């Protein structure tokens, strides 16, 4: 199920402003890749280019090519909805549908895809909640509102909702930034388990988190305000954190700038 992602010459704009320039990187299936770098260097922009969310903003566009197992997702005849189904996304703040029950939150995507049969929905909900390490905590209150859960539980609910439709890639944009340390560890454990099935890309400001959860790390940076973000170094996480090849990477991970 997990898929290989290849970005080649990816440049993204907000109107006339070039936010990222010429990003080239390959993400192997069943790995966790961390995107790190100072604020404004384009991590989120790049992440949102991968599932064609970037272009949702008026005037925003992407150049270059992005292939998922050799299929260019920017091809003219590609079905954008199918791309977003294949590439799920988890956001910074847990965003369960507030008026829906826990169960309905998890199966929302399946319902949109036309699944109607109750037994199939129930089975899929249990599977996704178990995968998100949330089943035991919610199995007796599936009919209660998702908004009634703690922040960490809500984020795991959002992860369950994302994986219920069985995507191949899961993008996470600072998924732990609104969570306490215990919930953060729960999500990190979960990422470790999920990479058995999915290709995961995570944006994080937390260096320890990048070092703990990822196999590969991509360091982005900008020269000065107004310049586009560029990929400075991309390597095995262990190498980036122990012996980076570029001085700028070292300065960043040791806290000397950013
Ligand atoms: N909707 C938008 N319209 C115009 N410019 C934007 C928009 N969103 C982001 N930008 C600009 O694009 C650049 C990259 O932003 P992006 O959010 O991708 O960076 P980031 O590395 O994820 O930052 P952070 O770590 O602060 O979240 C920044 O200069 C930002 O101001």
Image (cartoon, rainbow, N blue to C red):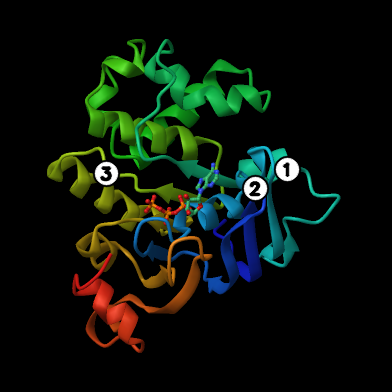
Quadrant where the C terminus sits is bottom left
Is 253 placed left or right of 214 in the picture?
left
Tell me where residue 172 appears, x and y as whole percent: 42, 48
How packed mark 3 is, by other alpha carbons closer than 10 Å (few <14, some 14-19, many 20 or more), is: some
How packed mark 2 is, by other alpha carbons closer than 10 Å (few <14, some 14-19, many 20 or more), is: many
Tell me where residue 257 appears, x and y as whole percent: 25, 69
Q: Earlier in the sequence, mark 1 or mark 2?
A: 2
Report the residue at 55% width, 49% height from top: 48
Inter-mark Cα distance, 2 to 3: 23 Å
Q: Identify the disc placed on residue 168.
A: none
Report the residue at 15% width, 40% height from top: 180
162 lies above or below 256: above
Tell me where residue 162 appears, x and y as whole percent: 48, 37
Quadrant where the N terminus sits is bottom right
Q: Are marks 1 and 2 in contact (CB under 8 Å)?
A: yes
252 lies above or below 127: below
Q: Earlier in the sequence, mark 2 or mark 3?
A: 2
* Frontmost residue, 113 versus 60: 60
Report the residue at 20% width, 63% height from top: 208
- Residue designated by label 3: 177
Inter-mark Cα distance, 3 to 1: 29 Å
* Frontmost residue, 125 versus 179: 179
- For label 1, the SS is helix
Q: Are marks 2 and 3 in contact (CB under 8 Å)?
A: no
- Residue designated by label 1: 80
Tell me where residue 84 appears, x and y as whole percent: 63, 42
Inter-mark Cα distance, 1 to 2: 7 Å
201 lies above or below 55: below
- Residue designated by label 2: 52
Q: Residue furthest right?
A: 77
Is 129 placed left or right of 186 in the picture?
right
């Amino acid at each position: 199920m997990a898929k290989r992602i290849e970005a080649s010459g990816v440049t993204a704009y907000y109107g006339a402003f070039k936010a990222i320039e010429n990003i080239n990187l390959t993400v192997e299936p069943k790995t966790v890749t961390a995107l790190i770098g100072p604020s404004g260097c384009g991590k989120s922009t790049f992440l949102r280019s991968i599932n064609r969310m970037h272009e949702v903003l008026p005037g925003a566009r992407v150049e270059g090519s992005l292939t998922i197992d050799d299929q260019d997702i920017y091809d003219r005849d590609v079905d954008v909805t199918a791309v977003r189904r294949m590439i799920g996304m988890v956001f910074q703040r847990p965003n369960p549908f507030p008026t829906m029950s826990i169960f309905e939150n998890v199966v929302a995507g399946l319902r949109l895809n036309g699944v109607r049969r109750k037994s199939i929905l129930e089975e899929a909900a249990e599977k996704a909640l178990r995968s998100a390490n949330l089943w035991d905590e919610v199995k007796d209150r599936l009919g209660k509102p998702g908004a009634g859960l703690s922040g960490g539980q809500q984020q795991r609910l959002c992860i369950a909702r994302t994986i219920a439709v069985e995507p191949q890639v899961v993008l996470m944009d600072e998924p732990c930034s609104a969570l306490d340390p215990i919930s953060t560890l729960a999500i990190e454990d979960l990422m470790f388990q999920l990479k058995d099935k999915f290709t995961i890309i995570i944006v994080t400001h937390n260096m320890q988190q990048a070092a703990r959860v990822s196999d590969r790390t991509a360091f982005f940076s900008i020269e000065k305000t107004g310049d586009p973000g560029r990929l400075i170094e991309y390597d095995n996480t262990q190498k980036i954190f122990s012996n980076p090849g570029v001085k700028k990477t070292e300065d960043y991970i040791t806290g000397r700038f950013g």
